[in-house]
């Protein structure tokens, strides 16, 4: 596999990742973690993550990683939720916070988004 994370995965790489996830689930793995490259605006697309996550359609959780906990928090909440929905998986966010003084009180805005997902 090419480890250049600044590009989209090829169909062969997506297939290989999906096969490895399926094998891990068959061997007792209880979930998967969606963690695209951490800088905003790059990394795996929603469709790429959803394709790899297809084995999770049985209800196995996809643990979403929020890439921004400050000004772009709403945008960062969207990708993991969409990836799980497209794959037919459940989404789990293991921690959620709004970082920075300018974001104090935004939980009133962000927490309802989990019910909408």
Image (cartoon, grey):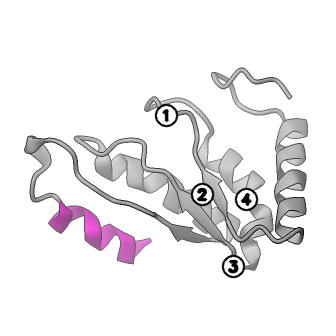
Q: CA distance from mark 2 to mark 1?
A: 16 Å
Earlier sequence position, callout 1 versus callout 3: 1
Q: Is residue 53 magenta?
A: no
Looking at the rendered structure, the secondary structure element under dot 1 is loop
x 85%, y 37%: residue: 13
Q: CA distance from mark 1 to mark 3?
A: 26 Å
Which residue ends up furthest to the front in the rendered image? 28
Q: Nearer the viewer, mark 3 or mark 2?
A: 3
Earlier sequence position, callout 1 versus callout 4: 1
Earlier sequence position, callout 2 versus callout 1: 1
Residue 68, disc: none
Quadrant where the N terminus sits is: top right
The residue singled out by tag 4 in the image is: 53
Q: Nearer the viewer, mark 1 or mark 4?
A: 1
Q: Position of residue 35 (x, y in %)?
A: 58, 45
Q: CA distance from mark 1 to mark 4?
A: 19 Å
Earlier sequence position, callout 4 versus callout 3: 4
**Tag 2 near tag 4, CB within 8 Å:** yes
x 45%, y 63%: residue: 94
x 22%, y 41%: residue: 71
x 69%, y 64%: residue: 87
The residue singled out by tag 3 in the image is: 59
Q: Position of residue 99 (x, y in %)?
A: 21, 45
For the residue pair 43 and 94, the one nearer the viewer reads as 94
Estimate how packed mark 1 is, as few (under 14), some (14 to 19) or many (20 or more) residues with alpha carbons within 10 Å: few
The residue singled out by tag 2 in the image is: 83
Is residue 3 rendered to the left or right of residue 100?
right
Looking at the rendered structure, the secondary structure element under dot 3 is loop
The residue singled out by tag 1 in the image is: 38
């Amino acid at each position: 596999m090419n480890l250049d994370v600044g590009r989209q995965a090829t169909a062969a790489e997506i297939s290989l990742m999906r096969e490895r996830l399926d094998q891990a689930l068959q061997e007792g793995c209880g979930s998967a973690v969606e963690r695209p490259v951490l800088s905003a605006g790059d990394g795996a697309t929603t469709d790429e993550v959803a394709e790899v996550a297809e084995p999770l359609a049985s209800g196995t959780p996809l643990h979403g990683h929020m890439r921004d906990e400050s000004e772009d928090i709403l945008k960062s909440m969207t990708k993991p939720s969409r990836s799980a929905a497209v794959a037919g998986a459940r989404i789990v966010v293991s921690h959620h916070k709004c970082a920075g003084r300018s974001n104090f009180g935004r939980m009133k805005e962000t927490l309802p988004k989990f019910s909408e997902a």
